[in-house]
Image (tube, rainbow, N blue to C red):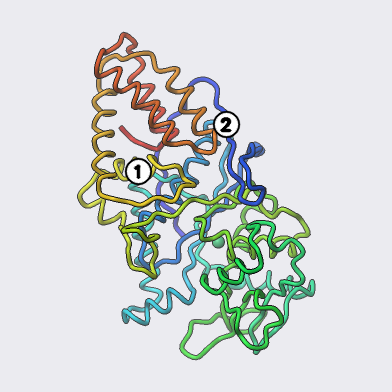
Amino acid sequence: MRSWPAPNVPKLPGQSVPLRLYDTSAKQVRRTDPGPTAKMYVCGITPYDATHLGHANTYLAFDLVGRVWRDGGHEVHYTQNATDVDDPLLERAEQTGIDWQALAEREIELFRTDMEALRILPPREYVGVTEVVGEVADLIAQLSAKGVTYELDGDVYFSVSDAPKFGQVSGYSQAEMLGLFAERGGDPDRPGKRDPLDWLLWRAERPGEPAWDSTLGRGRPGWHVECTQIALANLGPGFDVAGGGSDLIFPHHECGASEGHAATGEWPFARFYTHAGMVALDGEKMSKSKGNLVFVSKLRGAHDPMAIRLVLLAHHYRADWEYTPDHLAAAEARLARWRSAVALEAGPDAEDVLATVRERLADDLDAPGALAAIDAWADRALAAGGSDTSAPDLVRDLADALLGVAL
Ligand code: ZN
């Protein structure tokens, strides 16, 4: 389906710095080593209650990954899905009396508008699951042919005992896995399953639920396998980064990695599993189920989207943090200071600012460190001026290209 329009990204002079990124699977920061085309898959929204600050925080983190790679001369092939049919969406549609497809379409459109306003670079492929149900069913049939699945009352499960790498993405204990599986959409207690952690690949048609014809009969895909198929179809195995919020580490990315391994025989399915932290409000993680959401679209009504972007950039992407309106006031003050400084006819030399911003972002996306470098330059420019007439434009360009902040 349609993605959203791409903002312009200025070309920067000088030498880029190769990106080092935290890999959840390796539990350490490692240097990314993409080919000429860097490949990234980031899990998309389930389209209801879009787009809260937690979503924006995740997509911004991976936007920075793409920007650093682009600065390094790589082409970036970025794919994202939208889970436009799944239990939570159908439940919300039922509760609100809105047709599930109309709800999904409305929220995806809102998401696109929010992403564009925040200057998030769009994916090359933005794929709704409902567009590829047949392909997902074909992948499940392939997995079945390899003997790693079984049927339960017409539904198809992946058998965790046939997943030799299971646990290597999250590193979680069996007890942690069981707890999170139940909490995040799994069904550990369903009678007839061989192992509580076996996960659903295909849900046969139920009365009143949407279903599609496929090689598996009528039904719809489970959550994890949709991403595996969309990533495989567009990026192939062994792509550079699989991303999402830290609540996707388990079971979503764990299960997807084992599906990819079973389908292709290649491990790892993604070279990096990278996760953004959670944004809280009033002491609790911002989530749809708790209803404590701050929506980007609502903030946009009264605030510059670039200030919203600066709120997020002021926190390291892996940190869990709590949003308060003070953050937005501070970001607006910072934005005003930066804009005043780049509006000057000359300023202090800014080549070291570019070098520092590159170095900070390449170090596992240290955006707060990058902001501090621009703050220092803006303070110097506003206090004492400077004689470099190209410096204000260079700072404007680097803030735009590397941080996505249009001044
Ligand atoms: Zn996903």
Q: Measuring from the top left, give residue 361's x and y in whole percent.
A: 50, 34
Q: In the rendered image of this protein, does residue 399 appear above or below residue 115?
A: above
- Which quadrant of the figure has residue 213? bottom right
Q: Which mark is residue 38?
A: none
Q: Nearer the viewer, mark 2 or mark 1?
A: 1
- Which residue is label 1 attached to? 309
- Which residue is label 2 attached to? 73
Distance CA(mark 2)–CA(mark 1): 24 Å
Q: Residues within 10 Å of mark 1 (few under 14, many from 20)?
A: many
Ligand 1: image quarter: bottom right
Closer to the chain start, of discs 2 and 1, is 2
Task: Identify the residue shown where x is 37% and y is 82%.
Answer: 94
Image quarter of the C terminus? top left
Q: Secondary structure at mark 1?
A: helix
Q: In the rendered image of this protein, does residue 256 appear above or below residue 53?
A: below
Question: In the image, what residue type sits under mark 1?
Answer: Arg
- Which quadrant of the figure has residue 18? top right
Task: Identify the residue shown where x is 60% and y is 60%.
Answer: 253
Q: Secondary structure at mark 2?
A: loop
Q: Nearer the viewer, residue 212 or 18?
A: 18
